[in-house]
Image: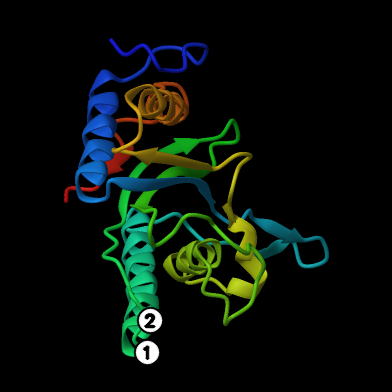
Amino acid sequence: MYKSVIKHHGPLNQRYLRRFEETIKRSLREHPRTSAFRCDLRFPSEARNPCLDMPTYFIDTDPAVITRFFASLDAKVEAVLNRRRKIGKRTHACTIRNIWVKEYSERHQEHYHVLLLLNKDVYHALGDYSYDPSNSDLAAMIRAAWCSALRADPERFWTLAHFPESPTYYLDRNAHPDKLSQAWDALFYRVSYFAKADTKQYGNGSRSFGCSQK
């Protein structure tokens, strides 16, 4: 059993918690200073035109959408890093690791909770959230990657990738053990919410959670 876990949302899936722990530890082994960012990925709601009685816009959920999201984000970050290298800027390696779960709201709408783990020496903040095709801040790339995965117009659906309150955590492997322990406990408590059994559906042929394999 883990001590730094959320306890007021019912039973937690212990296998999920073990995988979460392994993924965070892999990030710290590669990137001694790791940034962790929380985001939620939502789907467009069905909006009906009262005159035509038909949907004005609706995107069906697709099990491959989360894979497309991570592939798009990886490509966007690598493109930014390559541009920096070409102009001679010092650029650190940055493996993006992820932890995600798919959940269902009370209205049975799918959504994803995601934790992204990156090298803090490359990304220490989400940056500017606003829509701008030239914006290369991490938050903008996350939002653009989700729109790309949905095959949706980014200007219209920019905010479907949502950043909750206090979305950023830092782990420093070389920090004082007490400080590292406090940071680890705070992050693990936050991500343990992903492991709750409630709001997930099993046996429908689609995955409910995943973690980076690398």
Residue lying furthest left: 214
Residue in the image at 31% along x and 20% along y: 13
What residue is pinned by disc 2?
84
**Amino acid tagged 2:** Arg
Residue in the image at 36% along x and 55% along y: 66
Name the mark on residue 87.
Answer: 1
Q: Secondary structure at mark 1?
A: loop
x, y percent for residue 24:
28, 38
In the displayed structure, 27 sits above or below 47; it is above
Count neighbours of disc 2 (C-alpha within 10 A) and say few if under 14, some if 14 to 19, many if 20 or more: few
* Residue 113 visible from this viewpoint: yes
Residue in the image at 17% along x and 48% along y: 213
**Amino acid tagged 1:** Ile
Between 105 and 87, the one nearer to me in the picture? 87
Disc 2 and disc 1: Cα gap in Å? 5 Å
x, y percent for residue 150:
47, 65
Residue lying furthest right: 51
Between 73 and 176, the one nearer to me in the picture? 176
Please name the colour scheme applied to the rendered image. Answer: rainbow
In the displayed structure, 69 sits above or below 135; it is above
Q: From the image, which quarter does the N terminus lie in?
A: top left
Counting labels gives: 2
The quadrant in which residue 114 appears is top left
x, y percent for residue 123:
44, 59
Q: Secondary structure at mark 2?
A: helix
The quadrant in which residue 61 appears is bottom left
